[in-house]
Amino acid sequence: MKASVYIATSLDGFIARENGDLDWLSGGDSAGTGEDYSAGAGENFGFQEFLDSIDTLVMGCKTFEVVVASGQWPYGNKPVVVLSSRPVQIPSRLVETVESQSADPTELVKKLSERGAKHLYIDGGKTIQGFLNAGLIQRMIITRVPILIGKGIPLFGPVNKDILLKHLETLSFPNGFVQSKYAVHE
């Protein structure tokens, strides 16, 4: 089974503000920068190609809540597993494709593999950290947004051991985004 990360961070390594807000990412001048990060209309930074390559998403509860609150559901009919130790409110429009599980990453990968999943999209800070520490992520695509937000939810946290990455490619976009792709060495 292959597990990959596709995520954006501020230049200082945060995936969201402390309260989970992504205003700095969504474009316009909502972050007070004067910059329009949504420039390059129609550019999806390879997200659709990435989404087409995966068959199941695994995300943390907080990430799920942020996506649902945005009013958009970018994952179509792909199966989504929300990791949570507490009950998760799944909107009725998503009950056919979204389920909640309370499992450690290794146990969940085994279950999903038995169901036929071949390529997982891992999303959410703590979820990514847990999968990295369990040695279950093979590829990471990280897009850096040219903004410093100072504090927030970090992409990376403490690791059980050094995790060696192999740089595969870096792309830059007209709006200043820089996207790097890495393979995780086993």
Image (cartoon, rainbow, N blue to C red):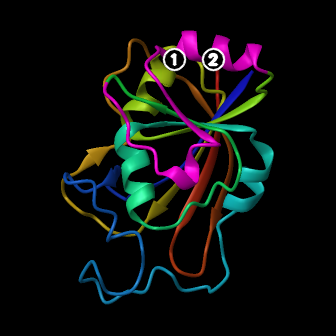
User: Which one is in front, 144 or 129?
Assistant: 129
Quarter where residue 98 is shown: top right
User: Which one is in front, 184 or 97?
Assistant: 97
In what element is the residue under mark 2?
helix
Residue at label 2?
Answer: 109
Residue at image coords 59%, 81% = 174
Q: Start and end of the magenta stretch?
A: 86-115
Residue at image coords 46%, 51% = 91
Residue 76, x across and y down, in percent:
69, 56
Residue 56, x across and y down, in percent:
68, 36
Q: Vertically, is 134 above or below 183? A: above
Binning the other alpha carbons within 10 Å of mark 2 as few (below 14), some (14 to 19) or many (20 upward) gives many
| Residue 73 drawn in magenta | no
Q: Quadrant of the N terminus?
A: top right
In what element is the residue under mark 1?
helix
What's under tag 1, amino acid-wise?
Pro
Find the distance from the CA under tag 1 to the CA under tag 2.
6 Å
Residue at image coords 75%, 13% = 114
Residue 3, x across and y down, in percent:
66, 29
Q: Vertically, is 114 above or below 117? A: above
Residue at label 1?
Answer: 105
Q: Is residue 142 visible?
A: no
User: Which one is in front, 103 or 6?
Assistant: 103
